[in-house]
Amino acid sequence: MSVLGYLYTCAIRSRCPCCGRGSLFRGWLTFRKACPACGLVFEQWVGDWTTPTWIAHSAGFLAAMGMFTWMFITGRFMEGPV
């Protein structure tokens, strides 16, 4: 399966990444325990993304504050309505 086909099947249509037929969700925001078509178990690992998420948010915040500070000190891009 091509990358675009995989993206369409799994991300946009919310289908099983293994078979592409079973639904990932039961209702709007409730994950199924397993795929109804192929039986693949969907596991959510609690805490696995805590550190990467914290690092990404911290890096983004520091970059945004650095850019704002640079804009404030140099006066660039500060003209016009805010």
Image (cartoon, helix red, strand yellow):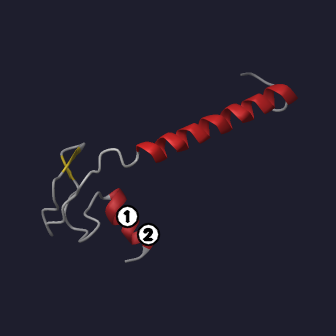
Q: What residue type is disc 1 on?
A: Tyr
Please give the residue where the numbered disc 2 appears in the rendered image. Answer: 4
In this view, the residue farthest toward the bottom is 1
Q: What residue type is disc 2 on?
A: Leu
User: In the picture, which quadrant includes the C terminus?
Assistant: top right
Label 1 with label 2: CB-CB less than 8 Å: yes
Please give the residue where the numbered disc 1 appears in the rendered image. Answer: 8
* Identity of the residue drawn at 73% across and 35% down: 67
Secondary structure state at the residue bearing disc 1: helix
In the rendered structure, the answer to whether residue 67 lies left or right of residue 22 reads right
Between 8 and 69, which is closer to the camera in this rendering? 69
* Identity of the residue drawn at 25% across and 64% down: 16
- Distance of label 1 from label 2 (alpha carbons): 6 Å
* Identity of the residue drawn at 41% across and 43% down: 50
The relative height of residue 44 versus residue 59 in the rendered view (above or below) is below
Secondary structure state at the residue bearing disc 2: helix
- Residue 26 percent across, percent down from the top left: 17, 49
- Residue 42 percent across, percent down from the top left: 22, 58
Q: Which mark is residue 71?
A: none
